[in-house]
Amino acid sequence: MIDLLRGFMNWLFEPSIALTLTIVAVWALYRYRRVCTQNKIVGGLIVASPLLFFFFSAFDPNFWIQFKRPDNIPIAGMMFLVVFFTWFALKLAVDNDDRIREGRPPKEADPEEEEKVFVWPDLVYTELLCLLLVSILLVVWSILIPAPLEEPANPQLTPNPSKAPWYFLGLQEILVYFDPWLAGVVIPTFIIIGLMAIPYIDTNEKGNGYYTYEERKSEIFLFQFGFIVLWVFLVFEGTFLRGPNWNFYGPYEYWDPHKLVPLTNINLSEVLWARWLGIGLPSFWLVREFVGIVLMLLYFVALPVWLARGFLRRYYDQMGLMRYVIFSHLLLWMVMIPIKMYLRWTINLKYFVAIPELLFNI
Amino acid sequence: MAEAKAQKAAGTAAGTGTNRREFLASFPFVTAAWVAMTGALAGVGAATLRFLYPNVLYEPPQQFKIGLPTDFQVGEVSTAFKDRFGVWVVRNDEGFYALITVCTHLGCTPNWLATENKFKCPCHGSGFYSSGINFEGPAPRPLERAAIALADDGQIQVDKSQKYLFEQGGWDDPSSFLPFTA
Ligand code: FES
């Protein structure tokens, strides 16, 4: 019974399924936000879900090995914090949305609900207490669980698996699917620029100073997609699911360094010319990669135009050409990440366009 | 003009003693201070730059001998020189080649997995056949080969300063491969 359950959980955590489930979960949380936040049982289950998962998983010897590593403990804590605060913010938002619908001001702006305290002593006092408590926590933590120091570095021996610091595990995961210059330089730059560009792209003034979801649905959902799915989930995956030789392991699976996973990559051009047409690859890259190049042009050039006239018309009208171009490209790059992950996991697709002659691969 | 100046000078001398500003300006102290500060900053800058370069470099030698051709078995991927020299030596049916132990993705050191018959990188999972060709994971190109030749004393000599890249046609170069002649 337990083994069956473990097998089922391992299957649930296969990358393509786990990613899909995460996306669906985020979507469902916002779609059924009323039930999720106002029903005590559902809400309690959501908040407790990471605790339950880690509590039950800790009985599994294989999971325990990974879980108890000093550098993995904060990740488990982070899962709890992310779920809790996502849920909590949504709860406040739903409450406010209800008030707004009834024609009342949001709670934060309601004079009747107003709760004002002095900076001195109330706020400063609270801050001092927090400072003390957090310092004590950190000191105790660092005494009880020493930092994982290893032997001096040896250039001929790379630890297996070699993991980036936890906050970079998302980027390390992206490195698996994209050419190094894209995943290592272009995409991180886009992330930073994109975050900085948010206030210029999202000029919806609703929600300033109070929680709300209904007044800025797509903004919040898009951000949470980038944060929860493409950052937190990838950190979790890199921490608990990536094992020796950077293979995927289920959470209750033993990290066997000899696990055999057939992963032979294939480029779109190889699928097209060799598999479908049955002739060899043309030698000139423009001919060879023609379909991939057209596909990328469709995706990055035609798709935003098409969206501007249809699905995203409202945004296009609001933003104007320049801001819409920037917005749509950041969006398309963001969506490109899960697209490539799915394609790699399902059909082992490596690159849409592979031109090693020009060091250009997508 | 001259009178006024003299008067002023006399006035200061008679009144508050020496005018401090004029006194200082007449000495090259300020100049010296600026020179000293610039010098010190340049020194700190130079020391910082110098700090970027290690005092001792434990770099494996670029040219080395790895033994007689008969020391290797056909089909063997020798990991014996990985730690010391950073190469794998492969003996196939026809001869020898030396693969450099640097992943072409971001430079980690892959491991040779004999049972799976492949090199596998622990950083992002790139896999390479024993020929060095990349077939899985993100590595965009095959492993690099080093120059390999027979030395005068009959030993195999590897020269890592000469690299042969598959995608540049380097593996067709005769120095990237040493045919076995018994
Ligand atoms: S460095 Fe080898 S796979 Fe990334």
Image (spheres, coloured by chain):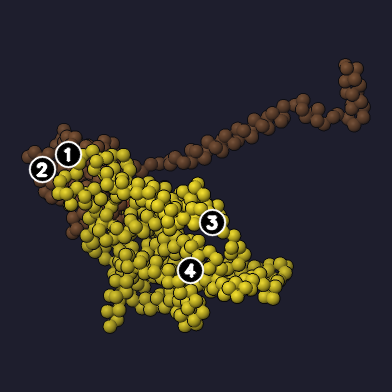
Chain colours: A yellow, B brown
Task: Output the chain of dot 2.
Answer: B
Task: Output the chain of dot 4.
Answer: A
Task: Output the chain of dot 3.
Answer: A
Can residue A318 be seen here? yes
Residue kind at label 1, given as amino acid type: Phe
Q: Which of A184 and B85 is in front in this view?
A: A184
Residue B180 location, quadrant: top left
Q: Nearer the viewer, residue A271 or A12?
A: A271
Task: Output the chain of dot 1.
Answer: B
Give the residue number, with chain letter if any, for mark 2. B94
Residue B11 location (% of width, % of height):
92, 25
Please, what secondary structure does the residue beneath circle 1 have? Answer: loop
Name the image quarter holding the C terminus of chain B. Answer: top left
Q: How crowded is mark 3: few (under 14 residues within 10 Å), some or many (20 or more)?
A: some
Give the residue number, with chain letter if any, for mark 4. A82
Mark 1 vs mark 4, CA separation in Å: 55 Å
Residue A159 location (% of width, % of height):
33, 57
Q: Earlier in the sequence, mark 1 or mark 2?
A: 2
Please, what secondary structure does the residue beneath circle 3 have? Answer: loop
Residues indicated by labels 3 and 2 sit on the same polypeptide chain: no
